[in-house]
């Protein structure tokens, strides 16, 4: 089959991967997740069609009922492709300069399981779903949506220092409607605020601790985690998923039918690898000195219900039912991030109607750890 070249336009902001992001700053917060909401998301966006013909199932990880709320500052974002693109006279992506942005997203672990004895071994793996992701740069929003299927939302994001030196403050505003009713005008609304105390060790803030991660909160452990991060993926095991150095994400990429917008002409699960390296300056915050405030108003209720929220009294403007919580753990570090692998995991069969045969489903589901041995288990892309 002859490959169809993509037609590049100077009006497009799509810059294809791979990407290289040096010297990023990550502030991470571990929150309790609503397992039922996570499973509903898996069933709606990943477990499409007939289970037998699909051959796999995505499930929320009930044994690790936590989500990572990550707030990342990217001072430099560049394409790292070494292959010149054939884009018909357009300026090469590698020559278009750099991009910077702030990004805030929720990552929830999900388990993909093969549904036969053979695929239970070869196709089962742990991935991360991103039920909401906000970015401050429009180019990043376009790239994420059009190429990866990530439902990136363009937001106003501000990062800075909170009251004490070394502390953190992050704010996110999104376009939305305060009431979901006729004649309501869309405007920028507060969505999320996070404030912290200074990183440990510190004499400031709450004197008492409440979580398991208190055991790890010491200068010795912080130094150990920083050193271990330079050796393969040892940090993944040490931190129980707290700071995954390789994050494999999964998302549903789809396109609407022009004549029937309620129908899709293409649906596929896209897998992406984000690899963290050179982790330095790893520090914890006292979790009781961290306040996460989610504005659970009308436009945002569908994207805030993944986090388990305490039943605190309503506060804020009329119609804005805010909820505040402290995370299970909170930390920050610096690193280099490489977004270096992307592949189509599964293309769903689509009924094209009008007597046309449906498109054929294809799969490339061999788990990353087993891919070097995939030939021993049959072809990688079975029909």
Image (spheres, rainbow, N blue to C red):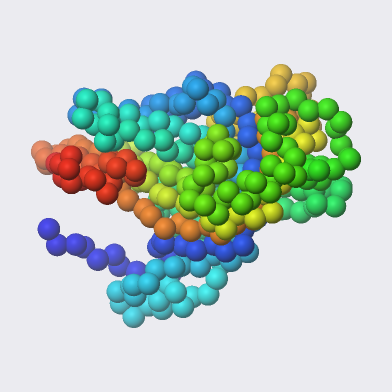
The quarter holding residue 18 reads: bottom left
The quarter of the displayed image where residue 133 is located: top right
Q: Residue at x 32, y 29 (%)?
A: 113
Whole-percent x and y of residue 162? 82, 48
Residue 229 location, x and y as percent? 57, 50
Please tell me in which quadrant of the rendered image residue 310 appears: top right
Identified at 51% across, 34% down, the residue is 108
Q: How many marks?
A: 0
Residue 35 visible (yes or no)? yes
Q: Is residue 37 above or below residue 276?
A: above
Q: Residue at x 41, y 35 (%)?
A: 126
Residue in the image at 80% along x and 52% along y:
166
Residue 360: x and y in percent read 16, 41
Picture coordinates of residue 274, whole percent (x, y): 47, 51
On the question of residue 171 being in view, the answer is: no
**Screen quadrant of the C terminus:** top left
Closer to us: 321 or 353: 321
Residue 217 located left or right of residue 99: right
In terms of depth relative to the viewer, which is nearer, 200 or 271? 200
Q: Is residue 336 above or below residue 83?
A: above
- Tell me: 34 left or right of 383: right
Spot the residue most to the right. Answer: 203
Quadrant occupied by the N terminus:
bottom left
Residue 60 lies, with reference to residue 128, above or below; the image says above
Would residue 154 appear left or right of 270 to someone viewing this image? Answer: right
């Amino acid at each position: 089959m002859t490959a169809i070249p993509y037609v590049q336009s100077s009006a497009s902001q799509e810059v294809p991967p791979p990407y290289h992001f040096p010297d990023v700053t990550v502030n991470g917060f571990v929150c309790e997740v609503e397992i039922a909401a996570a499973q509903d998301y898996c069933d709606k966006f990943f477990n499409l069609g007939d289970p037998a013909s699909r051959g796999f199932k995505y499930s929320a990880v009930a044994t690790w009922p936590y989500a990572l709320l990550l707030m990342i500052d990217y001072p430099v974002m560049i394409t790292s492709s070494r292959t010149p693109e054939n884009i018909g006279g357009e300026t090469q992506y590698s020559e278009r300069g750099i991009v910077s942005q702030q990004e805030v997203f929720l990552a929830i672990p999900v388990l993909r399981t093969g549904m036969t004895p053979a695929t239970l071994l070869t196709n089962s793996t742990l991935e991360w779903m991103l039920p909401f992701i906000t970015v401050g740069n429009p180019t990043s929003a376009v790239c994420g949506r059009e190429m990866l299927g990530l439902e990136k939302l363009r937001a106003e994001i501000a990062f800075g220092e909170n009251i004490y030196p070394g502390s953190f403050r992050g704010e996110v505003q999104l376009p939305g409607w305060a009431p979901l009713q006729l004649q309501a005008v869309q405007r920028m609304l507060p969505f999320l605020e996070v404030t912290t105390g200074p990183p440990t060790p510190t004499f400031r803030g709450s004197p008492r601790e409440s979580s398991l991660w208190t055991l790890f909160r010491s200068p010795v452990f912080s130094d150990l985690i920083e050193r271990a991060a330079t050796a393969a993926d040892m940090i993944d095991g040490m931190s129980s998923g707290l700071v995954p150095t390789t994050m494999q994400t999964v998302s549903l990429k789809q396109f609407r039918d022009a004549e029937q917008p309620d129908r899709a002409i293409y649906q596929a699960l896209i897998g992406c690898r984000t690899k963290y390296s050179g982790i330095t300056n790893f520090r914890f915050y006292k979790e009781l000195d961290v306040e996460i405030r989610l504005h659970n108003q009308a436009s945002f209720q569908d994207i805030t219900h993944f986090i388990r929220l305490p039943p605190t009294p309503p506060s804020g403007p009329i119609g804005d039912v805010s909820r505040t919580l402290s995370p299970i753990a909170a930390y920050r570090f610096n690193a280099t991030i490489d977004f270096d692998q992307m592949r189509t995991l599964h293309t769903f069969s689509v009924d094209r109607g009008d007597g046309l045969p449906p498109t054929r489903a294809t799969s490339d589901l061999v788990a990353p750890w087993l891919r070097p041995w995939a030939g021993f288990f049959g072809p990688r892309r079975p029909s």
